[in-house]
Image (cartoon, coloured by chain):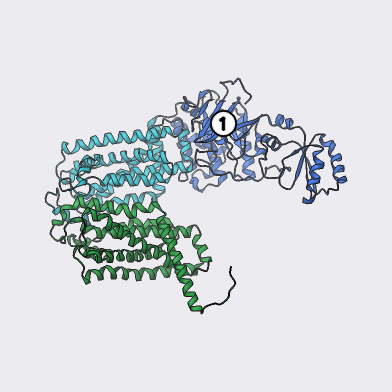
């Protein structure tokens, strides 16, 4: 413990402290993800498995009427694969937060001078990093299998950013759930629900080929738009529209989910 | 009350059937009393039917696709997956018994060892009936139609019982090997993988690439064919015998696995 | 340990029992013989190997080496016959929380092959015996710890076994439940049941057992009737507490009157060779040495002394003082992984 000598202006000092706290929390959040091998399967291997299955099973589907013009099914499905992986990854991130709460570590954090918001932001930053990482890894792994991103390297960069933003967007929801329930079992229970939501979207197959009520749901499902931003970049090429979709949709969802997470955080703190 | 010093009551330790029935009754009661363990297992095939047939609605338009209703294609798959997870569920409850210590008590009873496997098997079959019946009813509501009359239901149920038998043996064996929830994760993972490396999503004729080769040799493909035939066309012996053989052989393998690992528990 | 001739027709006989778990020697050569109608106590701390021995004798675990026969049958080659004749209540009450007490008893009766007509009457009889008739139709998950133990005991008695194994039957129970269970064990024993129980409570072994074996680190270190064991220790323990500064002087003084004994923190103990009569000499010697005695008591040899002499440490952390009827406060046993270690 050093003795206080000269202190800079209060506002500057708080900001610097806040930043370093946030960075520390982000680091911890990212490490926590990397250190859990149980995360690897659902968030990395499963999506790739599904992509591989889909390519072989639905290879001929690309010739169907209403199917967007693609060279191969993999080009079509990589977007869904990325979103799928990010979705699963953030469920597990939320479960980790809930475990922290269950085991009292969260309370211990609250007892430190760490600012409340930096706990949340740190958690979300970890999710962002992992989401971006997943997008990058999927692209790299699938490149040898024949995908080609029409939007080029720039498009790939935008996709990775989109992965990170989606990580935040979904992470906000799962964090809110963790803060609300404080139970990792409850958060993990949302896994099947998210999985279903993934199906009722254009993640696996084009909306245009669906019919009836199903199509209506897919049209309304925000996940469809998350996926199609990336898909556009892969399949169509770099257009303002595609890039905008890829960036703005997750931001839009993120604004909403972060607000929700903040509200849940504060109500949790107020209830203590 | 006097103790019988020479031989205790119930000298023969019960028959396989009686003991298995007792254990099965316990299993069925558990289903009723802990619905949270069973309801997801029941909801999954129902949702899967709806979700798969909705998302992949258009694949029926691929030339050579055996039906024009996607729900006819995916309903039997959902039933098979549900049956598989019914068996795995018995693995789960066995892990719980092992962790709680109740399993020691079961092992110390003089009932034949096989009843410890057959009892859960009966419970799994009971679950299969519930799962398939429910899913089929929903499927009918969703537009599924039998193409060769009620015999199509018979083959579906046979496939379900068969898969449940295979997965019960597998689940129990893994439970005995690991004795904790790691077994549960492994059960789910392996079942899921095996069931999907088949003609689950598309017929063999439509498949391309590596999956085609894998699915061709995967015995579960035969079982799926057995389950689906009544919803695609005619029920024929040709579509049936492969599935039956697969069921018998794989059941024998997994049940032996379970039985062996049960015996090894005292090592 | 000392039995060279095992009577292989005794209810429980074991020779050279060994059990390894990887590199760990949980049981390292145990010989034992329990005669008809005996209550035999296995006394030892956590990890001594008590539960492992029980698991071997009850067919749950195969010995790495050695032989055992229970109720006349070999535990390895005639496991099912052994199971028919033994009742077992293990350390954690082995119950299914979703079932009612009655349902569990009925299942047990079915698994033990009781004729259909006898199943419910037997269940009713046992429920009454252990005092659970009122709770019979409640789910076992709602039972208290004591109730679960009682149900566990009832489950072990369904088929009227001739040999009963109880693994730490009163650990974690309140004093009243403990006494009730002791009475039940005595009653069963009077009816002719041979009992092998393991315990970490000296009082329990002293009160219940006809013979006791002290087990430590997988071996039996001493065996005999409680009376004989205590008599073998011989000298009573003179226990004093003195101010810390004078402890060294006090120790030197005491050591002149006999062998120093291990005692609890903050006390000094000596095995008084001269018996109770030598107390005055000790007090005078301490006084002459200028030692201020804060507390003094004289304890006849207890099983704790037997234990300390055999193993070099005390079984219970409590001081070597008189315990009340209910026995000392139970220390929670370590939770061991199923079937491993212990």
Position above or below: B172 against A260: above
Q: Nearer the viewer, residue C60 or C262?
A: C262
Tell me which residue sits at (57%, 41%) in the image: C131
**Image height of C327 relative to A5, above or below:** above
Chain C in the picture: what colour?
Answer: blue
Q: On what subunit does the disc labeled 1 rest?
A: C
Q: Residues within 10 Å of mark 1 (few under 14, many from 20)?
A: many
| Residue at 58%, 67% in the rendered image | A1
Can you say whether C222 is above or below C316 in the image?
Answer: above
Instruction: Please give left or right for residue B256 compared with residue B138 in the image.
Output: right
User: Which residue position is annotated with label 1?
Assistant: C28
Q: Is residue A267 visible?
A: no
* Left or right of B236 on screen, residue C284: right
Q: How many marks?
A: 1
Q: Residue at x 45, y 71 (%)?
A: A19
Q: Which chain is green?
A: A
Residue C22: percent from the left, percent from the top?
Answer: 49, 36
| Place of residue C206 in the rendered image (x, y in percent of width and height, measured from the top left) | 68, 35
The N terminus of chain B: image quadrant: top right
Question: In this view of the protein, can residue C185 be seen by the observer?
Answer: yes
Which chain comes out cyan in the rendered image?
B
Side (left or right) of C99 relative to C334:
left
Residue B88: x percent and y percent? Answer: 35, 43
Q: Residue furthest left?
A: B63
Q: Secondary structure at mark 1?
A: strand
Q: Nearer the viewer, residue C59 or A61?
A: A61
Determine which quarter of the picture holds residue B6. top right
Residue C64 vs C47, above or below: the answer is above
- The x, y position of residue C9, in whole percent, is 56, 21
């Amino acid at each position: 413990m050093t003795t206080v000598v000269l202190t800079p202006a209060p506002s500057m000092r708080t900001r610097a402290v806040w930043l370093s706290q946030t960075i520390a929390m982000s680091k911890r959040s990212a490490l926590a993800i990397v250190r859990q091998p149980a995360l690897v399967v659902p968030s990395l291997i499963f999506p790739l498995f599904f992509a591989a299955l889909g390519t072989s099973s639905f290879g001929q589907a690309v010739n169907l009427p209403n199917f967007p013009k693609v060279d191969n099914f993999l080009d079509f499905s990589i977007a869904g694969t990325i979103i799928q992986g990010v979705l699963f990854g953030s469920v597990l991130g939320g479960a980790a937060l809930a475990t922290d709460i269950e085991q009292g570590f969260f309370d211990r954090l609250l007892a430190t001078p760490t600012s409340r918001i930096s706990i949340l932001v740190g958690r979300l930053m970890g999710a962002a990093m992992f989401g971006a990482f997943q997008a990058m890894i999927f692209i790299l792994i699938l490149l040898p299998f024949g995908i080609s991103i029409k939007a080029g390297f720039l498009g790939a960069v935008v996709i990775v950013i989109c992965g990170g933003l989606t990580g935040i967007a979904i992470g906000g929801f799962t964090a809110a759930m963790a803060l609300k329930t404080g139970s990792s079992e409850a958060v993990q229970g949302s896994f099947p629900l998210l999985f279903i939501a993934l199906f009722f979207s254009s993640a696996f197959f084009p909306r245009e080929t669906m019919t009836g009520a199903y199509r209506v749901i897919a049209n309304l499902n925000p996940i469809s738009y998350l996926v199609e931003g990336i898909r556009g970049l892969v399949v169509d090429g770099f257009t303002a529209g595609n890039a905008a979709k890829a960036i703005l949709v997750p931001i839009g969802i993120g604004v909403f989910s972060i607000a929700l997470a903040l509200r849940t955080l504060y109500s949790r703190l107020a209830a203590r | 009350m006097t103790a019988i010093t020479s031989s205790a009551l119930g000298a023969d330790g019960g028959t396989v059937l009686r003991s298995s029935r007792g254990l099965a009754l316990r299993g069925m009661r558990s289903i009723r009393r802990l619905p949270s363990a069973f309801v997801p297992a029941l909801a999954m095939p129902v949702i899967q039917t709806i979700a798969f047939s909705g998302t992949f609605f258009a694949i029926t338009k691929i030339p050579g696709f055996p039906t024009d209703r996607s729900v006819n294609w995916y309903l039997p798959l959902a039933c098979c997956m549900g049956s598989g997870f019914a068996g795995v569920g018995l693995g789960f409850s066995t892990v719980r018994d092992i962790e709680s210590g109740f399993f020691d008590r079961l092992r110390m009873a003089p009932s034949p060892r096989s009843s410890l496997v057959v009892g859960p098997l009966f419970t799994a079959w009971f679950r299969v009936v519930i799962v398939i019946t429910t899913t089929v009813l929903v499927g009918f509501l969703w537009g599924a139609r039998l193409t060769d009359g009620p015999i199509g239901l018979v083959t579906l149920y046979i496939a379900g019982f068969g898969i449940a038998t295979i997965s019960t043996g597998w689940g129990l064996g893994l439970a005995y090997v690991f004795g904790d929830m790691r077994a549960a994760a492994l059960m789910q993972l392996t079942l899921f993988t095996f069931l999907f490396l088949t003609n689950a999503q598309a017929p063999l004729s439509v498949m391309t690439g590596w999956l085609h080769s894998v699915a061709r040799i995967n015995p579960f493909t035969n079982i799926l064919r057995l389950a689906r035939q009544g919803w695609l066309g005619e029920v024929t012996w040709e579509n049936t015998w492969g599935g039956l053989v697969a069921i018998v052989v794989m059941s024998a393998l997994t049940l032996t696995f379970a039985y062996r690992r049960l015996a090894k528990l005292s090592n | 340990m000392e039995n060279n001739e095992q009577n292989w027709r005794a209810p429980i006989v074991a020779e050279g029992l060994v059990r390894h778990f990887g590199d760990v020697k949980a049981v390292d050569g145990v010989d034992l013989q329990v005669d008809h109608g005996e209550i035999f106590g296995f006394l030892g701390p956590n990890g001594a190997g008590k539960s492992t021995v029980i698991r071997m004798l009850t067919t749950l675990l195969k010995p790495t080496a050695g032989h055992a026969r229970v109720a006349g049958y070999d535990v390895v080659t005639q496991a099912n016959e052994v199971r028919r004749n033994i009742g077992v209540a293990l350390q954690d009450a082995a119950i299914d929380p979703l079932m009612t007490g009655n349902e569990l008893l009925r299942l047990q009766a079915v698994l033990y092959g009781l004729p259909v007509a006898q199943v419910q009457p037997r269940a009713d009889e046992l429920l009454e015996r252990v005092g659970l008739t009122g709770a019979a139709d409640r789910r076992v998950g709602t039972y208290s710890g004591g109730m679960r133990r009682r149900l566990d005991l009832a489950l072990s008695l369904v088929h009227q076994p001739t040999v009963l194994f109880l693994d730490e039957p009163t650990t974690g129970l309140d004093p009243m439940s403990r006494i009730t269970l002791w009475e039940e064990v005595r009653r069963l024993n009077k009816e002719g049941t041979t009992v092998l129980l393991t315990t970490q409570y000296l009082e329990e072994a002293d009160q219940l057992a006809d013979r006791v074996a002290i087990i430590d680190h997988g071996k039996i270190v001493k065996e005999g009737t409680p009376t004989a064991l205590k008599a073998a220790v011989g000298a009573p323990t003179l226990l004093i507490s003195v101010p810390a500064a004078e402890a060294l002087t006090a120790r030197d003084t005491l050591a002149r009157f006999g062998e120093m004994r291990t005692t609890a923190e903050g006390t000094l103990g000596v095995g008084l060779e001269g018996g109770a009569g030598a107390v005055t000499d000790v007090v005078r010697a301490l006084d002459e040495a200028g030692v201020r005695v804060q507390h003094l008591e004289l304890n006849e040899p207890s099983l704790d002394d037997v234990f300390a002499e055999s193993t070099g440490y005390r079984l219970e952390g409590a001081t070597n003082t008189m315990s009340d009827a209910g026995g000392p406060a139970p220390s929670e046993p370590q939770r061991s992984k199923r079937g491993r270690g212990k």
